[in-house]
Image (spheres, coloured by chain):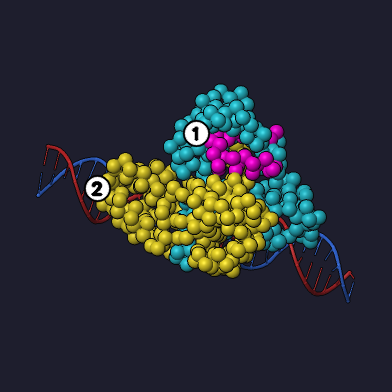
Chain colours: A cyan, B yellow, C red, D blue
Amino acid sequence: MVSEKTIGRLSLYRRLLTELLADDRLNVYSHELASLAGGTAPQVRRDLMAIGYSGSPSKGYDIADLADSISSFLDNPNGTRVILVGVGNLGRAIMSYFKIQRPTLNIVASFDSDPKKIGSDICDRPCCDIAELETKALELDVRMGVIAVPADRAQNVSDKLVTAGITGILNFAPTRLKVPDHVYVEHVDLTTSMEKVAYFVQSGRKSTEPDA
Amino acid sequence: MVSEKTIGRLSLYRRLLTELLADDRLNVYSHELASLAGGTAPQVRRDLMAIGYSGSPSKGYDIADLADSISSFLDNPNGTRVILVGVGNLGRAIMSYFKIQRPTLNIVASFDSDPKKIGSDICDRPCCDIAELETKALELDVRMGVIAVPADRAQNVSDKLVTAGITGILNFAPTRLKVPDHVYVEHVDLTTSMEKVAYFVQSGRKSTEPDA
DNA sequence: ATTAAGCTGTGAACTTTTTCACAGACCATC
DNA sequence: GATGGTCTGTGAAAAAGTTCACAGCTTAAT
């Protein structure tokens, strides 16, 4: 079984590979990829081993082929339909951020409670009433949700997403969500990230870890 | 030496404690804090042990006192002055997000290259020309920076921050920054976070890890 | 051909992080 | 003041993650 950390790095490797490909590179060595990713060469090799990918001892890894292998491991072949709840500054930022991204990740609609936003299009996607969250989510057949509402609303939104059959949540609200066992939650906690950096600045300690 | 992961959790505990305090709670047990934080009781106790904090076997931890202890461990007593570079959607979201936050973290100015933004106030803080980044950063005596510019500009901004004496960077651009050893970088990689969730949705695997 | 150099794949060692499990402390109640 | 229940603090065990180090392959050059 592939570890959560490895999943994260594979995603990173794929992006780096895509950049290399745009530079007309064909092959890459584990130590090059490691240096771009901020990791070590054995780490890269282990990660690729985890998905059963093999390179060649002399040429390293075939960039296009490896990127494809990672994609077929990570992605749902039918794409992943996503809804986003909470169209504040942050929500809008995320929407516009992912318009450009991989077409396999598709934010199909957003939700908010502000009547001024409801009914309009935000980043070319309809913004719906948060009251309709459950019905629309079922209707749109989505499995993944992004929460970008204030902390005090997050748990409620999460519950609604779960009853609508969502099994993965990316949560930007500064609350730890309670969800059933079968639901995966990734917390992006801006306050904690900020405070971590502040701590290391204050303490004068340097980075040791390969990174989160 | 306190581990990076523990630092992150301490930041989380402090926020939870503040919430409990607002509910007029006085004491809390490790298992309660653990449940709020999405962790385990021994983990909480270990983390508090790391900063040398002791509770009482019967009452658990004194909420106000523990929050203070965490603060005096994490925070710089003089506060941490921060600048933010890149006032797009995301940058603005972060600015407004941290206006409300702990007063010890203070975003004192923002920077952008857009003439329309330069000179105006954004979230009550002056927005300056990115060309003046190095001089202003020195002048403002900041040690920490937030990067919210597009990927292709991030390394350049990072270099400027480093020469201006910054020792901690929170990076939202989807690039791994190269910095000298004494500089701490925390990457918040939205694409990777998103793709991780998408993977777990697709694979039907549930969360195992205590979380990033 | 043979040698040299430099890569990958991976068992094994190591390090870090988490969990277990229990001694000792404390309070409430009888 | 003894008894029982429930907590903390922590050594020790376990698990997870990372790095080492080297065998084996592949190419290039002699």
Q: Residue B172 appears at what percent x and percent y?
A: 59, 52
Mark 1 or 2, which is nearer the eye?
1
Q: Is residue B89 magenta?
A: no
With respect to residue A25, does A93 lie above or below? above
Rendered-image quadrant of the N terminus of chain A: top right
Question: C4 or C16: nearer the eye?
Answer: C16
Number of numbered tags placed on the structure image:
2
Residue holding disc 1: A158
> Is B44 drawn above or below residue A41 in the view shown?
above
Where is residue A42, by image quadrant?
bottom right
Task: Name the residue beneath numbered marker 2.
Answer: B58
What are the residue bounds of the magenta stretch? A78-102
Place of residue B181 in the rendered image (x, y in percent of width and height, measured from the top left): 57, 68
Q: Which element carries disc 2, helix, strand or loop?
A: loop
Type of amino acid at the residue the image marks with label 2: Ser
Q: What's the residue at 67%, 47% (across, down)?
A: A51
Q: Circle 2: is it few (<14), some (14-19), or many (20+) Cα within 10 Å?
A: few
